[in-house]
Amino acid sequence: MEELAAAVRRAGEDGLTVKAVGTGHSFTSIAATDGVLIRPQLLTGIRNIDRDALTVTVEAGTPLKRLNMALAREGLSLTNMGDIMEQTVSGRPAPAPTAPAASRPR
């Protein structure tokens, strides 16, 4: 985490923009940047599960495939899941104003 913070700080000092991407599965140039590209592959895992609120806090580099397996072990799932499981949490756009919440499978 310190390395990431230092990279963002240096980019700011150098007047560069910072763009975070997931696995880069898109065939478009959406991940292209003239600034600093951050790929958070080492920031993975579930940080917190709030069963009352049905929310899960995860690291940005967590692949959806691993997130889904971890949620299943907890008796939870995503309420809205696309068909590309290789994406990371940071790379998956939310389908609505908020990201999909965890839910208990029915």
Image: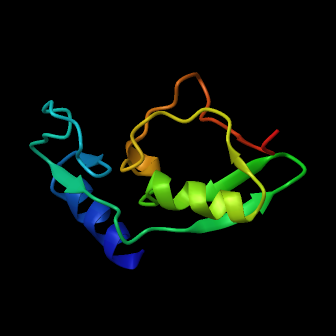
Q: Residue furthest left?
A: 34
Task: Give the residue at x 35% y 62%.
Answer: 40
- In the rendered image, residue 98, in percent from the top left (x then y), is placed at 62, 30
Colouring method of the image: rainbow
The one of 1 and 47 positioned closer to us in this rendering: 47
Q: Residue at x 69, y 54 (%)?
A: 56
Q: Is residue 59 visible?
A: no
In the image, residue 37 lies at what x, y percent? 20, 53
Report the side of 33 relative to 24 (left or right). Answer: left
Q: Is residue 10 visible?
A: yes
Q: Residue visible at 19% across and 40% down?
A: 31
**Where in the figure is residue 88, as x and y percent of width and height?**
41, 51
Give the image quarter of residue 69.
bottom right
Which quadrant of the figure contains the N terminus? Answer: bottom left
Residue located at (61% from left, 65% from top): 46
Considering only vertical position in the picture, is 48 above or below 32? below
Q: Where's residue 66, x and y in %? A: 50, 62
Give the residue furthest to the top. 96
The C terminus is located in which quarter? top right
Q: Quadrant of residue 49?
A: bottom right
Residue lying furthest front in this view?
106
Residue occupying the far right of the picture = 52
Which residue is more in the foreground, 16 or 1?
Answer: 1
Q: Is residue 33 left or right of residue 88?
A: left
Foreground pick, 47 / 74: 74
| Residue 68 position by quadrant | bottom right
Total numbered badges shown on the rendered structure: 0
